[in-house]
Amino acid sequence: MIRTAFAATTLLLAVPAAAQSQQEALDARYDRALAAGYKALMLCGAISSAEANGTTRTPESVAQWELTGIQAPLDALIAELPFTIIRSPDGPIARVAVSWAQDMPARVAVYGGPGNGCALAPIGTPDGAADPRLPVEFSPHPEPKVLGTVELPMIEGWKPPPRNLLDLVLEDALAQGYGKGRSTAVLVNRYDGDGTVAQGWGRFIGGLDYKTPQRTFSVAKSIAATLVGAAAYRGEVDVNASAGLGLSDADPRRVITIDHLLRMASGRYSDTPGNRTDPLYYGGAAVEEVALDWPLIAPPGSTYRYANNDTIAAVAAIRGTFASHPPAELFAKLGMRGTVAETDWQGDYVLSSQVWAPADDLAKLGQLYLNDGKLPSGERILPEGWVKYVTTPSGPQPPTGTFGYGAGFWLLNKEEGVPADTFAAIGNRGQYVVIVPSRKVVIVRRGEDPAGSGFDIAAFTRDVLAALPK
């Protein structure tokens, strides 16, 4: 095995030396464990997904982008935790281990090979333990013809635009013109009537380019809704049927449908705003342990509560379809060849957040929705009316902010200067896929925004649309 190690000169202690209550000491120790898990999973996912897509990421690049500006208290702990990257004899990453306490094994993220991504082992798992997941098998579509530029992968029919006002808008986005966030990529594609790219503009920063996958965070929720739609088109699921939650048919949670879950209207309790799900994301817990068992506190469909666990439960409701139709199959059909959906260590997809995708792949997701669920070839993969379904608000809406919510997608239908049919996939740290059917435009903005900064996607969308050449 090839090892790359970045070790601290002094081994870290589990808790600070200052006097603490028992709970404070436990919380401090848990935070270190979560920080180590975060670091292991981000290093493993960023580097392995880039290499699988034909490019590279260095640990320094990951430290600069994915591992800075994250939520407290993890942000103050990440940098000091020493890590080791273990590679297979033939070169690809095998796993990443991050040390966090003298008396515990390092936190370990294991790479499952192309199509699998990385999974985080539970806290306390010895380094070198076997990856329990089964490999995902699928038949990729042929590679597309690439005509090439350094800024944007050319698609047949793409026309290089003249420099104009739109160039200035895109450059402004990279220069913090729409907030204090850190933009890494902006893409704008305009499509012909047949759904193919007519014109495209792209800008990238920080050594990242169109081949570089970044974590989608909650854009994955819109990908999850797309997977549900594809299963519905195949006749394998009904969004109005029970999602199967609860222990028996007598359990009141059995009345929760997949539709309720996609609309964040399950009525289940969540312990934090946004339902942080740290034990699952960074603690190495499994979907079955922590995402499906939350109790009911309101009638399903009566209240809106944004919750990672609702999307995870919707995906769990269709997991029986993944043996024949894994997410990788859908990605291949869409030409999203750099996209990887990760799982927990038991093999269940964490499609509320844990997907890696380059900017151009996310534009292809938007293109599917511009084309009413059909591929450029004309093949339908989403039901007729699915776009209307995901963009139609039903029942309670978000109590704060100006964006509405449909089924897995946000609605920008009340923003001044933005067409009323505009909708978007939105994720933490500044991930946006904005779809404007009336203008046949898809806008992608990728970022690594520090916690609490933000990016004004409505203003950016308005300015992009105003600046597009006629």
Image: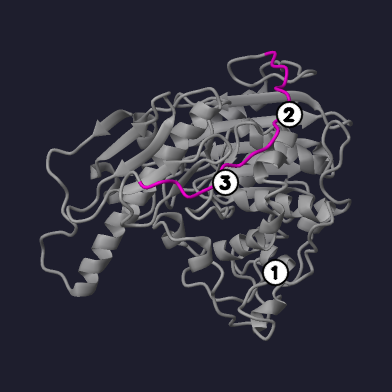
The tag on residue 456 is 3
Secondary structure at numbered mark 1: loop
Amino acid carrying label 3: it is Asp
Does 286 appear above or below 178? below
**Relative to 55, is 87 on the left or the right?**
left
**Relative to 160, is 372 on the left or the right?**
right
- Could you tell me residue 221's position as x and y percent? 63, 53
Q: For the N terminus, give its image quadrant.
A: top left
Q: Residue at x 86, y 42 (%)?
A: 380
**Label 2 belongs to which residue?**
141
Main secondary structure type of the part rendered in magenta: loop
**Label 1 belongs to which residue?**
243
- Disc 1 and disc 2: Cα gap in Å? 32 Å
Magenta span covers which residues?
Answer: 129-147
- Disc 2 and disc 3: Cα gap in Å? 36 Å
- Could you tell me residue 456's position as x and y percent? 57, 46
Question: Of the residues under marks 3 and 1, which one precedes in the sequence?
Answer: 1
Amino acid carrying label 2: it is His
Does 388 appear above or below 54? below
Secondary structure at numbered mark 2: loop
| Visible residue check, residue 462 | no
**Relative to 275, is 313 on the left or the right?**
right
Q: For the C terminus, give its image quadrant.
A: top right
**Residue at the farthest bottom position:** 250
Q: Nearer the viewer, mark 2 or mark 3?
A: 2
Q: Please state which of residues 383 and 389 is positioned toward the viewer in this rendering.
A: 383
Secondary structure at numbered mark 3: loop
Image quarter of residue 340? top right
| Visible residue check, residue 75 | yes
